[in-house]
Amino acid sequence: MRRLIYAMAFLLLIGLVAAGVFTHSRPPGAKALLTRAAQAMEKAQSVHVVLHRTDMPWPDSPVGIRMSPDRADQWVGPEVEAFTAVSPEGAITMSMGLNLGTGEVWSGSEAGNIYVANLRPLGTKGEEIGRKEVRESLALFAEGLLGRGAKFIHLKNLTESVTTETRDGRRVNVVTYAGDTPVVSRGQLVKERYVFDLDARSGRLLAYRRYASVPGVKEELVGGIEMIEYDVPVPTTPRPQVGTVLPATLRIEETADTLKLIMSAGDKYIMTIEVPK
Protein backbone atom coordinates (compact mmCIF):
# COMPACT_ATOMS: atom_id res chain seq x y z
CA MET A 1 0.00 0.00 0.00
CA ARG A 2 2.15 2.86 -1.25
CA ARG A 3 -0.05 4.60 -0.59
CA LEU A 4 -3.68 3.58 0.01
CA ILE A 5 -5.24 6.65 -1.58
CA TYR A 6 -2.78 6.86 -4.47
CA ALA A 7 -3.15 3.17 -5.19
CA MET A 8 -6.93 3.35 -5.31
CA ALA A 9 -6.84 6.33 -7.65
CA PHE A 10 -4.34 4.51 -9.85
CA LEU A 11 -6.53 1.40 -10.00
CA LEU A 12 -9.44 3.57 -10.99
CA LEU A 13 -7.76 5.60 -13.71
CA ILE A 14 -4.47 3.98 -14.79
CA GLY A 15 -3.07 7.27 -15.91
CA LEU A 16 -4.31 10.85 -16.23
CA VAL A 17 -3.31 14.57 -16.42
CA ALA A 18 -3.38 17.90 -14.63
CA ALA A 19 -5.20 21.70 -14.24
CA GLY A 20 -5.77 26.14 -14.41
CA VAL A 21 -7.97 29.29 -14.20
CA PHE A 22 -11.51 29.99 -15.42
CA THR A 23 -12.49 32.95 -17.55
CA HIS A 24 -15.99 33.65 -18.84
CA SER A 25 -14.80 34.26 -22.39
CA ARG A 26 -12.80 31.09 -22.98
CA PRO A 27 -11.77 28.26 -20.65
CA PRO A 28 -8.06 27.51 -20.22
CA GLY A 29 -6.46 24.48 -21.82
CA ALA A 30 -7.01 20.92 -20.66
CA LYS A 31 -3.77 20.62 -18.71
CA ALA A 32 -4.33 23.91 -16.90
CA LEU A 33 -7.88 22.95 -15.93
CA LEU A 34 -6.83 19.58 -14.55
CA THR A 35 -3.95 21.16 -12.62
CA ARG A 36 -6.42 23.56 -11.03
CA ALA A 37 -8.70 20.64 -10.13
CA ALA A 38 -5.82 18.81 -8.45
CA GLN A 39 -4.92 21.93 -6.46
CA ALA A 40 -8.55 22.39 -5.37
CA MET A 41 -8.68 18.79 -4.19
CA GLU A 42 -5.47 19.14 -2.19
CA LYS A 43 -6.88 22.19 -0.38
CA ALA A 44 -10.07 20.44 0.72
CA GLN A 45 -10.45 19.49 4.39
CA SER A 46 -12.12 16.23 3.40
CA VAL A 47 -13.27 14.40 0.28
CA HIS A 48 -15.88 11.68 -0.27
CA VAL A 49 -15.70 9.89 -3.62
CA VAL A 50 -18.20 7.40 -5.06
CA LEU A 51 -16.54 5.43 -7.81
CA HIS A 52 -16.32 2.30 -9.94
CA ARG A 53 -12.84 0.88 -10.37
CA THR A 54 -11.42 -0.44 -13.62
CA ASP A 55 -10.85 -4.21 -13.49
CA MET A 56 -7.81 -5.17 -15.55
CA PRO A 57 -6.96 -7.36 -17.23
CA TRP A 58 -10.41 -8.78 -17.97
CA PRO A 59 -10.14 -11.48 -20.69
CA ASP A 60 -13.90 -11.75 -21.33
CA SER A 61 -14.17 -8.10 -22.36
CA PRO A 62 -13.54 -7.16 -26.02
CA VAL A 63 -11.32 -4.31 -24.80
CA GLY A 64 -9.51 -6.40 -22.17
CA ILE A 65 -10.76 -4.34 -19.22
CA ARG A 66 -14.13 -3.63 -17.66
CA MET A 67 -15.82 -1.41 -15.12
CA SER A 68 -16.12 -3.17 -11.80
CA PRO A 69 -19.74 -3.77 -10.81
CA ASP A 70 -18.77 -2.91 -7.23
CA ARG A 71 -19.68 0.49 -5.83
CA ALA A 72 -16.80 1.95 -3.87
CA ASP A 73 -16.68 4.75 -1.31
CA GLN A 74 -13.43 6.60 -0.71
CA TRP A 75 -13.08 8.89 2.33
CA VAL A 76 -10.17 11.20 3.04
CA GLY A 77 -10.31 13.51 6.04
CA PRO A 78 -8.24 15.08 8.82
CA GLU A 79 -7.89 11.79 10.75
CA VAL A 80 -9.22 9.17 8.36
CA GLU A 81 -8.48 7.57 5.03
CA ALA A 82 -10.70 4.68 4.04
CA PHE A 83 -11.77 2.71 0.99
CA THR A 84 -14.61 0.18 0.85
CA ALA A 85 -16.01 -1.58 -2.22
CA VAL A 86 -19.40 -3.32 -2.09
CA SER A 87 -20.81 -5.78 -4.63
CA PRO A 88 -24.30 -5.37 -6.17
CA GLU A 89 -25.40 -8.07 -3.71
CA GLY A 90 -24.22 -5.97 -0.78
CA ALA A 91 -21.08 -7.98 0.08
CA ILE A 92 -17.85 -6.17 0.90
CA THR A 93 -15.24 -7.06 -1.72
CA MET A 94 -12.41 -4.82 -0.51
CA SER A 95 -11.81 -2.53 2.43
CA MET A 96 -8.74 -0.85 3.85
CA GLY A 97 -8.02 2.20 5.89
CA LEU A 98 -6.59 4.07 8.84
CA ASN A 99 -8.46 5.86 11.64
CA LEU A 100 -6.25 8.01 13.86
CA GLY A 101 -9.15 8.68 16.21
CA THR A 102 -9.35 5.02 17.27
CA GLY A 103 -5.85 3.93 16.26
CA GLU A 104 -7.31 1.27 13.95
CA VAL A 105 -5.62 0.10 10.78
CA TRP A 106 -7.57 -2.46 8.75
CA SER A 107 -7.61 -4.47 5.56
CA GLY A 108 -10.42 -6.70 4.33
CA SER A 109 -11.24 -8.81 1.28
CA GLU A 110 -14.16 -10.54 -0.41
CA ALA A 111 -13.57 -13.57 1.81
CA GLY A 112 -15.39 -11.60 4.51
CA ASN A 113 -12.34 -11.33 6.78
CA ILE A 114 -11.19 -7.93 8.03
CA TYR A 115 -7.76 -7.79 9.63
CA VAL A 116 -7.57 -5.08 12.27
CA ALA A 117 -4.44 -3.80 14.05
CA ASN A 118 -3.86 -1.11 16.67
CA LEU A 119 -1.46 1.71 15.91
CA ARG A 120 -1.14 2.96 19.50
CA PRO A 121 1.25 0.32 20.92
CA LEU A 122 3.87 1.70 18.49
CA GLY A 123 3.93 4.99 20.40
CA THR A 124 4.86 8.34 18.93
CA LYS A 125 6.71 6.87 15.94
CA GLY A 126 3.65 4.90 14.86
CA GLU A 127 1.42 7.94 15.29
CA GLU A 128 3.88 10.03 13.27
CA ILE A 129 3.64 7.58 10.36
CA GLY A 130 -0.15 7.50 10.59
CA ARG A 131 -0.49 11.28 10.67
CA LYS A 132 1.87 11.68 7.72
CA GLU A 133 -0.12 9.12 5.77
CA VAL A 134 -3.44 10.87 6.41
CA ARG A 135 -2.04 14.39 6.04
CA GLU A 136 -0.59 13.70 2.59
CA SER A 137 -3.39 11.44 1.35
CA LEU A 138 -5.43 14.16 -0.38
CA ALA A 139 -2.39 15.33 -2.32
CA LEU A 140 -1.62 11.73 -3.27
CA PHE A 141 -5.20 11.11 -4.33
CA ALA A 142 -5.13 14.20 -6.53
CA GLU A 143 -1.80 13.07 -7.98
CA GLY A 144 -3.06 9.58 -8.75
CA LEU A 145 -6.37 10.84 -10.14
CA LEU A 146 -5.40 13.98 -12.04
CA GLY A 147 -1.65 13.59 -12.51
CA ARG A 148 0.83 16.29 -13.30
CA GLY A 149 0.78 16.56 -17.06
CA ALA A 150 2.39 13.40 -18.43
CA LYS A 151 -0.16 10.66 -17.78
CA PHE A 152 -1.49 10.41 -21.33
CA ILE A 153 1.82 10.00 -23.13
CA HIS A 154 1.08 6.28 -23.57
CA LEU A 155 -1.77 7.13 -25.96
CA LYS A 156 -1.03 7.25 -29.68
CA ASN A 157 -2.86 9.77 -31.89
CA LEU A 158 -3.61 11.76 -28.74
CA THR A 159 -6.26 14.48 -28.93
CA GLU A 160 -7.56 16.82 -26.23
CA SER A 161 -10.53 19.15 -26.06
CA VAL A 162 -12.30 21.52 -23.67
CA THR A 163 -15.96 22.44 -23.94
CA THR A 164 -18.22 24.39 -21.60
CA GLU A 165 -21.79 23.33 -20.82
CA THR A 166 -24.53 24.56 -18.51
CA ARG A 167 -26.11 21.85 -16.34
CA ASP A 168 -28.85 22.71 -13.85
CA GLY A 169 -27.69 26.32 -13.87
CA ARG A 170 -24.02 25.38 -13.27
CA ARG A 171 -21.29 26.02 -15.82
CA VAL A 172 -19.20 22.90 -16.32
CA ASN A 173 -15.92 22.59 -18.20
CA VAL A 174 -15.66 19.18 -19.88
CA VAL A 175 -12.08 18.06 -20.52
CA THR A 176 -11.60 15.09 -22.86
CA TYR A 177 -8.44 13.18 -23.74
CA ALA A 178 -8.62 10.45 -26.38
CA GLY A 179 -6.17 8.18 -28.16
CA ASP A 180 -5.12 4.64 -29.00
CA THR A 181 -3.38 2.11 -26.77
CA PRO A 182 -1.60 -0.80 -28.50
CA VAL A 183 -2.36 -4.08 -26.70
CA VAL A 184 0.42 -6.43 -27.81
CA SER A 185 -1.09 -9.54 -26.22
CA ARG A 186 -4.27 -9.00 -28.25
CA GLY A 187 -2.67 -7.60 -31.38
CA GLN A 188 -5.09 -4.68 -31.48
CA LEU A 189 -5.48 -0.99 -30.77
CA VAL A 190 -7.85 -0.04 -27.97
CA LYS A 191 -9.37 3.40 -28.36
CA GLU A 192 -9.57 5.14 -24.98
CA ARG A 193 -11.41 8.28 -23.94
CA TYR A 194 -11.06 10.05 -20.58
CA VAL A 195 -13.70 12.65 -19.69
CA PHE A 196 -13.51 15.02 -16.71
CA ASP A 197 -16.39 17.26 -15.56
CA LEU A 198 -15.05 20.33 -13.74
CA ASP A 199 -16.99 23.07 -11.98
CA ALA A 200 -16.14 26.20 -13.97
CA ARG A 201 -16.34 28.51 -10.95
CA SER A 202 -14.40 26.57 -8.31
CA GLY A 203 -12.31 24.39 -10.62
CA ARG A 204 -13.23 21.28 -8.65
CA LEU A 205 -13.61 17.88 -10.24
CA LEU A 206 -17.27 16.82 -10.27
CA ALA A 207 -17.14 13.48 -12.09
CA TYR A 208 -14.90 11.35 -14.28
CA ARG A 209 -15.54 8.68 -16.92
CA ARG A 210 -13.19 6.35 -18.77
CA TYR A 211 -14.33 4.69 -22.02
CA ALA A 212 -12.73 2.06 -24.26
CA SER A 213 -13.55 0.49 -27.61
CA VAL A 214 -12.11 -1.67 -30.39
CA PRO A 215 -13.07 -1.71 -34.08
CA GLY A 216 -16.51 -3.21 -34.59
CA VAL A 217 -17.44 -3.06 -30.91
CA LYS A 218 -19.49 -0.31 -29.28
CA GLU A 219 -17.60 1.94 -26.88
CA GLU A 220 -18.09 0.91 -23.24
CA LEU A 221 -17.70 2.66 -19.92
CA VAL A 222 -14.83 0.95 -18.08
CA GLY A 223 -14.43 3.07 -14.94
CA GLY A 224 -15.32 6.33 -13.37
CA ILE A 225 -16.31 8.59 -10.52
CA GLU A 226 -20.03 9.15 -10.05
CA MET A 227 -19.70 11.92 -7.49
CA ILE A 228 -17.23 13.84 -5.34
CA GLU A 229 -18.20 15.72 -2.19
CA TYR A 230 -15.79 18.24 -0.68
CA ASP A 231 -15.46 19.39 2.94
CA VAL A 232 -18.10 16.98 4.25
CA PRO A 233 -18.11 15.23 7.65
CA VAL A 234 -16.11 11.99 7.63
CA PRO A 235 -17.71 8.94 9.32
CA THR A 236 -16.45 8.43 12.87
CA THR A 237 -16.46 4.65 12.29
CA PRO A 238 -15.28 4.25 8.68
CA ARG A 239 -14.32 0.58 9.11
CA PRO A 240 -17.12 -1.74 7.95
CA GLN A 241 -18.87 -3.25 10.96
CA VAL A 242 -19.52 -6.57 9.21
CA GLY A 243 -17.53 -9.68 8.41
CA THR A 244 -15.15 -11.62 10.62
CA VAL A 245 -12.65 -9.43 12.48
CA LEU A 246 -9.23 -11.04 12.75
CA PRO A 247 -6.43 -9.62 14.93
CA ALA A 248 -3.32 -8.33 13.23
CA THR A 249 -0.14 -6.59 14.36
CA LEU A 250 1.97 -3.70 13.09
CA ARG A 251 5.71 -3.24 13.11
CA ILE A 252 7.88 -0.36 11.94
CA GLU A 253 10.62 -0.67 9.35
CA GLU A 254 12.89 2.26 8.60
CA THR A 255 15.03 2.92 5.55
CA ALA A 256 17.21 5.88 4.66
CA ASP A 257 14.27 7.65 3.02
CA THR A 258 11.06 6.06 4.29
CA LEU A 259 9.14 4.86 7.32
CA LYS A 260 6.98 1.76 6.92
CA LEU A 261 4.15 0.21 8.89
CA ILE A 262 4.07 -3.50 8.09
CA MET A 263 0.78 -5.22 8.90
CA SER A 264 0.67 -8.98 9.40
CA ALA A 265 -1.32 -11.72 11.10
CA GLY A 266 1.07 -14.38 12.34
CA ASP A 267 3.13 -15.40 9.28
CA LYS A 268 0.60 -13.87 6.88
CA TYR A 269 1.60 -10.53 5.33
CA ILE A 270 -1.35 -8.14 4.98
CA MET A 271 -0.16 -4.75 3.71
CA THR A 272 2.34 -1.90 4.08
CA ILE A 273 1.86 1.80 4.76
CA GLU A 274 4.90 3.76 3.62
CA VAL A 275 5.63 7.47 4.09
CA PRO A 276 8.70 9.57 3.32
CA LYS A 277 10.85 10.76 6.21
Image (cartoon, rainbow, N blue to C red):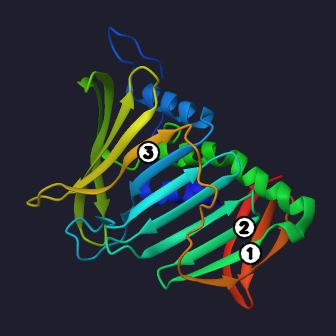
Q: Which mark is residue 104?
A: 2
> The residue tagged with tag 3: helix, strand or loop?
loop
Task: Inspect the image, locate mark 1, and give the three-letter code of the amino acid beneath it.
Answer: Ala
Q: Position of residue 15 (x, y in %)?
A: 44, 50
Name the front one of labels 1 and 3. 1
Q: Which residue is mark 1?
A: 117
User: Is the Cβ of the residue at disc 1 closer than 8 Å to that at disc 3?
Assistant: no
Tell me the quarter of the image containing the N terminus. Answer: bottom right
At horizontal 54% and vertical 61% (from top left) the residue drawn is 83
Q: Position of residue 274 (x, y in %)?
A: 73, 61
> The residue tagged with tag 1: helix, strand or loop?
strand
Task: Inspect the image, locate mark 3, and give the three-letter code of the amino acid beneath it.
Answer: Leu
> Can residue 257 be spotted in the picture?
no
Q: Quadrant of residue 171?
A: top left
Q: Position of residue 248 (x, y in %)?
A: 73, 81
At horizontal 91% and vertical 64% (from top left) the residue drawn is 123
Pointer 1 local density, CA inside 10 Å: few below 14, some 14–19, many at least 20: many
User: Is the Cβ of the residue at disc 1 closer than 8 Å to that at disc 2?
Assistant: yes
Q: Position of residue 236 (x, y in %)?
A: 64, 56
Q: CA distance from mark 3 to mark 2?
A: 32 Å
Query: Which is nearer the eye, 204 or 148?
Result: 204
Task: Inspect the image, locate mark 2, and give the three-letter code of the amino acid beneath it.
Answer: Glu
Where is 71 relative to 162, above or below? below
Name the front one of labels 3 and 2. 2
Q: Mark 2 or mark 3, which is nearer the start of the sequence? A: 3
Where is 223 relative to 21, above or below? below
Where is 234 relative to 255, above or below? above
Q: Which residue is mark 3?
A: 16
Locate residue 70 relative to residue 101 in the image: left or right.
Answer: left
> The residue tagged with tag 2: helix, strand or loop?
strand
Q: CA distance from mark 1 to mark 3?
A: 34 Å
Q: Mark 2 or mark 1, which is nearer the start of the sequence? A: 2
